[in-house]
Image (cartoon, rainbow, N blue to C red):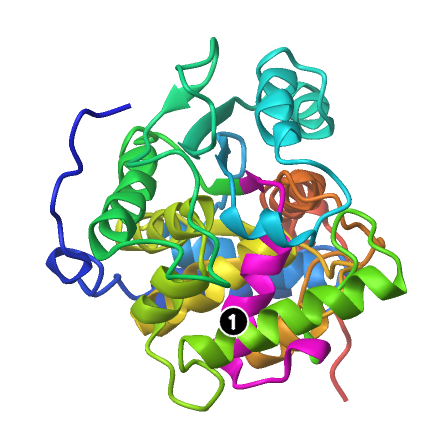
Amino acid sequence: MPGAVTREMPSTWIETPCPAPSAHHGAAARARQAMLTKPAGSLGMLEELAIRLAALQATERPRAANAPIILFAGDHGVTAQGISAYPSAVTVEMLKNFANGGAAVAVLARALDVPLKVIDAGTLAPEPLPGVVTDKPCRGTRDFTVEPALTEDELAFALAAGKRAVEAEVAADLVLFGEMGIGNTTAAAAIAAALLAKSPDEIAGAGTGLDAAGVTHKVEVIASSLARHGLDGPGADPRRVLACVGGLEIAALTGAIIAAAQAGRPVLVDGFIVTVAALAATRLNPSCAPWLIYSHRSAERGHATLLAALGARPVLDLDLRLGEGSGAATALAVLRLACALHNGMATFDEAAVSGRSTP
């Protein structure tokens, strides 16, 4: 862990515009789809995914082979309020499980033959862990029922940690992001409620397995915290929201999403937590929005509301709610098939197949 927090204000890079997708390559990919040996539109979203990737990657032949998964982890002071079914110690224990290959996303990464990079962006671990990159300004956030979760400097550091993680993936076709942090569904729900000006009971769900009474308590904790910080009305500033009720891993995800878009790399967004980071990212830098592909609709309460607010159509709907990047990893297989179909199918002319008759 660094000895001192570097003072890097988000505005020095966060607001730099992201490039626009290539309309030329998108149109060329759509024209190719029209020539392939199938009725137009018969492959549905697989066609649209290939076309969209082609526009984002500025190529007529999109690809999804090199797709690293970057997982950010952090701990949350708000766990002191009993808002999780698991103790905070699980965060660091799971970091070891990720590094040792035993977690769900680690299994998926092996099956997909993609690297999994695990970053301690703010856990309670006192020392660096084997197989884990440590890039954090402090060990966990403060309890936001009492005080802001992060200082301005800590927030800036965490955002930049996300940027640093992306900068190491220069050869990626696209990037996938995951997260781990006991208490982070509470922080994420608080961020979403503030940014969307929604009541917390529309957003907060069971997280790691709370019962109905636990969810009610979680909602009450979020509502009182938003009121304490003056975030219970419209027009909340996203930086202030992240500082007051955010998490270090959520801030790192936000910075990573923006940095990936700025570098021209598509992002495959995971479930509830990463989608909240995507919401924050699009509020901080709206030009990153076209670069985000939403992998799945989580079973966590509030995710559908988030997707609707972002105008997102997810690739999958499998009742997943694990996090870790598992939904994004699962959707990567679909993107790879979309690319294979787009690039490998024969055209009507190549296959000597008669095209559609015209009246």
**Residue at x-position 11% and y-position 57%:** 12
Up/down of 208 relative to 109, above or below:
below
Q: Quadrant of the C terminus?
A: bottom right
Task: Name the residue beneath numbered marker 1.
Answer: 225
Give the main secondary structure of the magenta stretch.
helix
Question: Residue 77 placed where, x, y %?
Answer: 50, 47
Residue 290 in view of the camera = no
Question: Residue 207 placed where, x, y %?
Answer: 74, 53
Element type at marker 1?
helix
Using the image as rendered, state which of residue 95 and residue 70 is in the foreground.
95
Give the amino acid at mark 1: Ser
Using the image as rendered, state which of residue 330 and residue 244 is in the foreground.
244
**Residue at x-position 17% and y-position 62%:** 16
Up/down of 51 relative to 95, above or below:
below
Q: Which residues are magenta?
A: 178-201
Residue 190 is covered by the magenta coloring: yes
> Looking at the rendering, which quadrant does residue 224 occupy?
bottom right
Residue 276 in view of the camera = yes
